[in-house]
Structure formats: structure tokens, C-alpha cells
Amino acid sequence: MLHKFTFYFLLFSFVVSAIVLSCKKEQKVDPTQKPTIVTLKDSLMEGGGVRLFGSLTPDPQITDYGFEYGEDSLFAKSAKISLGIKVTEKFYADILEGLKSGHKYFFRAFKSLNGAEKQGAVLSFISQGSKPILITRITPATADMGDTIIIHGKYFDIKKTAAYFDSYKASTISITDSLITCIIPYMNGRYSNNLTLKDGDSTRSTYRNYQLSTPIITSFTNKKFMGDTVEIIGNHFDRISNFTTEVDFGTVKAQIIGTSKNKMTVIVPTIYNTPVPITVVAQFQSVKSTSLFSLASPTILQVPTNAYTLDNLVINGNNFFPSAQYDYNKVFVTA
């Protein structure tokens, strides 16, 4: 009887062991096992912003994971923070901008697997606002209207932050949370040397005393006469003539017929006394030439060989005053 009991006991033990080993083997290779996704917690940052924490069972088939957050628990209008495909078991993400102080936000972790998305539990936090935008420097240190600059800093909102020069919005080329590449706008009127960063209508940061480059006059065409064209060569001229762009010969304003960064073309105005300096107003700044402009001297090309008393005498030449007429002895001079 004892031998029979021992036999059945050993048989029972063998069967149980086989089942356990089979289960372990099946658990190890079970292709239907899915990684879990857990929303862990949040941590408010000093001075604004929040850090969200989550955990995940790693799986090579995961195509994306991260967090979703918004101001309603149903996430009708939400934003996503995607962390890509480099999966780690515990992960976190920071929200530094776009948060309103005192508002309640809901968030949850998510993962994408084989085209389907799964979410963790919904948690919430009361925001203390966003991190204040910081501008650390701007390169180059000075520039012209129409030039490309790079604004260096922290906590830029890649969806909302834009640069303004006074009330003129700069054209953004690219933006990250720490770099904004943009083009200085063309401005009509005054510029107070203040660059501001705004999120919509809200001013987030101001960089004071960012100056435009000072124009430079290196040379110009001399010995020209009234009505002639003069080219002024230099740098940091206005590419587009605006209400403040100006060229003066002495105190007389000249007509501008062309302008670029390095050259301005103007018509010599009616002036009677030379030499005079040339003054260029560009980039909202005024610069005066170190050399002086002089009118070309008159030249006589033809004079009548004979005439009677009291006849009108016409003298032909260049660089006479336009439409000049001299009443003395009825002598008329035409250019």
C-alpha cells in the first residue's frame, strides 16, 4: 500500500512540476504580452513650469511615448510631448512655457504600439505659470534692417514666441526653446532700441538697447553739378528708403533715386555755396562725411563771334545755374 501511495505522490509531483515549467516557458515567450504605461506624478518648478513623470515597460515595437496635457480631463484641446522611440522604463518631460498661473491642468502618459495608442491614468496639477523667458544675448551685436540675427536665451515657446522691434514684428526663420533666428523688419518712424519677445499680445521679455548698425560713408562722386547723379558708397545704408531715410548736401535735401546696403544714388539739389559735407540718415541714425562735396566749375563751350549792341547774347556751356538769366545788358545764359 505504501509503495502505491509513493507512486501516486511522485506522479502527482511530476505533473505539477511539468505544468509550472510549461507556464514559465509560456510567460517568457508570450507574444501577446503588452507593455504597461503609468502616469506617476508631477513636480512644480520654482519660478514656473512643471515636470511630469511616467513609467513604461520597454518594448522594441513602441513607436512613440510621452505625455498629453490640457485644461480639461477629456483632452478635447490638448498638447503632446513626444519622446520618440528611445524607450526608457522611467521617463519625464518638462513644460516650461504656455502655462497660465492658477489654472488647473490635466495630464497623462501615453505610448504608441503597432499603430494603437494607450494612455495611463489622468492626473492634474495647479500651475504656477510658465518659466519667464530669458534673453541672454543677440548675435551679431548690431545689425541692419533686413539682416538676419539670432536671439539666444531660455524658455522660448516654439509655437507662440515672436520677436518685435518696437511695434514691428520680425519674420521668424526658425525657433527652438533657446534660439530664435529672425529677420529685422523694415520700420517707418522711430526705433527705441528695444527688442521684445511676445506670446501673442503678451510681452514676455524685453532686451533693451539693441542698436542698429551706424551708417558709414567711405566715398562719393565729387565735382558734379546740380541735377547730376551722385553715388555715395559706404555701409549700413537703408536697403529700402523709408520716411526717415535722407541725404543732405549741406542743409539742402537731395532726391534719392536708389538705395542699397552699400550704395545710395541721389540727385544733386540746388545749392549755391560749396564745398559742403554730405549727410546720410539711415538705420535711424545720422552720419556726416569727413570730406566735402564741391560743385563742378562752369565751362563755356561756345560764344557768338560777333553781335550788335543791345542784341541778346547766348553763351553755351555746362554747369551754369539752371535757367539762369542775367538782366545786365540783356545777356542770357543757357546751359
Image (cartoon, grey):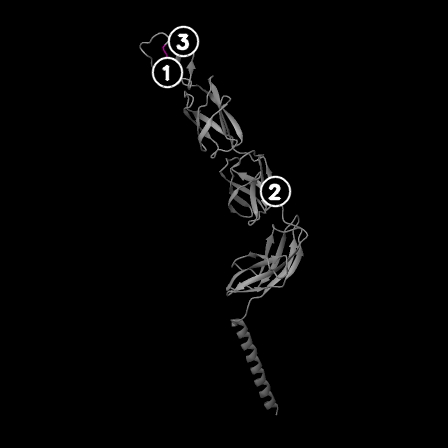
Question: Residue 230 or 179: which is nearer the viewer?
Answer: 230
Magenta span covers which residues?
Answer: 311-315
Which residue is the extreme one toward the left?
305
Q: Amino acid at mark 1?
A: Thr
Q: Amino acid at mark 3?
A: Asn
Q: Main secondary structure of the magenta part?
A: strand
In the rendered image of this protein, does residue 229 appear above or below residue 76?
A: above
Q: Which mark is residue 299?
A: 1
Residue found at x 54% / y 77%: 22
In the rendered image of this protein, does residue 212 appear above or below residue 36?
A: above
Q: SS of the residue at dot 2?
A: strand
Q: SS of the residue at dot 1?
A: strand
Q: Which mark is residue 329?
A: 3
Residue found at x 43% / y 12%: 327
Quadrant of the rendered image containing residue 206? top right
Residue 250's x, y, as percent? 49, 21
Identify residue for label 2. 205
- Label 1 or label 3, whichever lies nearer to me, is 3
